[in-house]
Amino acid sequence: MIRVAIIGTGNISAAHITSYLAFPERCRIVALVDIYPEKARAKAEQYELEAEVFDSHKLLLGSPDIDLVSVCTPPFSHADITEDFLNDGKHVIVEKPMASSLEECDRMITAAERSGKVLSVIAQNRFLDPIMNLKRVLDSGRIGRVLHAQVDSYWWRGHCYYDLWWRGLWSKEGGGCTLNHAVHHIDMLGWMMGLPTKVTAILSNAAHDNAEVEDISIAALQYDRGSVAQVTSSVLHHGEEQQLIFQGEKARISAPWKVHASTSLANGFPQRNEELEAELNHYYSQLPKMSHTGHQGQLDDVMTAIETATAPLITGQSGRMTIELITAIYKAGFQQKTVDLPIAHEDPYYTVQGIMENAPHFYEKTNSVVNLGNDQDISLGGTFV
């Protein structure tokens, strides 16, 4: 039986709690921690948990009664809490984004390597059938080399969204929509295509004058052999329509699933390749369905890694790659010039301090509240179907 502690009982903790509760034969939630303990007690009551409540994660350090920790706190605290528990011999799954800087990511990875414990970073959309199967089609080589990728990370958040005490601050949230919303889609892009060699970007805040951070960014990515990608990160888009499109040498595929394939006429103009489209659709339709999806799928994967002493699908290195690409987008946007990857340890943007010293304040935060809404009022991204 895997004994679980959840650190931070804000909105996203509900996704962890309900996912763990789906596996009663494998795990049990034994502790809830929040700097506002009344929130933790409310969660325990809401989900009928027989769990102890604490107001600091440090009170759990040294406890022999915890095996796995879910870190669901604001981004600025991810690294220290994760490092503390890994050094204490606990397995850790940390919410996205992994951390606010590459230096913090490397500290977390080093702690995991030293302890021999599992470190995983939430990227629950990989555990959706449309995304997993899109990856499988790409890996099959059936569309040839990817020439262009389009990532539309479209979200919508009201003005009051940034009134929550830690949101909208570079020092607490670590960034805006690029780091905290598009992190899902940037993770998927990195998983499917790896890191680019060059990045250029523009950042703006067009609609949220109560936040220091960006509410939209547009990035262009250059890969080896001439392939390119475009990534739009936004909390301005009504409808929250989200998609990933890959244009290959032979065909176009996407999530939500759609196929178009072309061959060349004698004059170079396109002719539809219905045979390849049928082949791709058949291959896609035969791919296996996942038994657990979203957060539940990822927590299942992490617990399996613990039970079998294997690596989870999403490791600390996976989370770090996503942060490296996001950091490059910020650096390119802040400096208004193209930047090269990888980002070196001596680069100012490797650390939180360096990012803070260079980050623009689009506006100053004007309000700060402890709570906004409830768990049922949040959206976690598209289903891609």
Image (cartoon, helix red, strand yellow):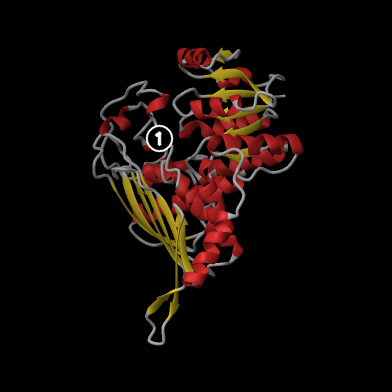
Whether residue 224 can be seen here: no
Depth check, front residue: 226 or 368 = 226
The residue located at (37%, 20%) in the rendering is 370
Viewer-side residue, 267 vs 53: 267
Residue at x 47% of width, y 50% of height: 186
- Total numbered circles: 1
How packed mark 1 is, by other alpha carbons closer than 10 Å (few <14, some 14-19, many 20 or more), is few
Residue 8 x %, y %: 50, 24
Residue name at image x 28 percent, y 34 percent:
158
Q: Is the N terminus in the top left, top right, bottom left or bottom right quadrant?
A: top right
Q: Quadrant of residue 50?
A: top right
Say what amino acid the circle numbered 1 marks: Ser
Q: Is residue 81 above or below residue 97?
A: above
Report which residue position mark 1 lands on.
379
In depth, the one of 1 and 6 nearer the eye is 1
Q: Is residue 93 above or below residue 273?
A: above
**Residue 91 horizontal/vertical position (percent):** 66, 32
User: How far across and down, in percent of the image, does residue 118 sit?
Assistant: 67, 37
Does residue 179 appear to the left or right of 32 in the view shown?
Answer: left
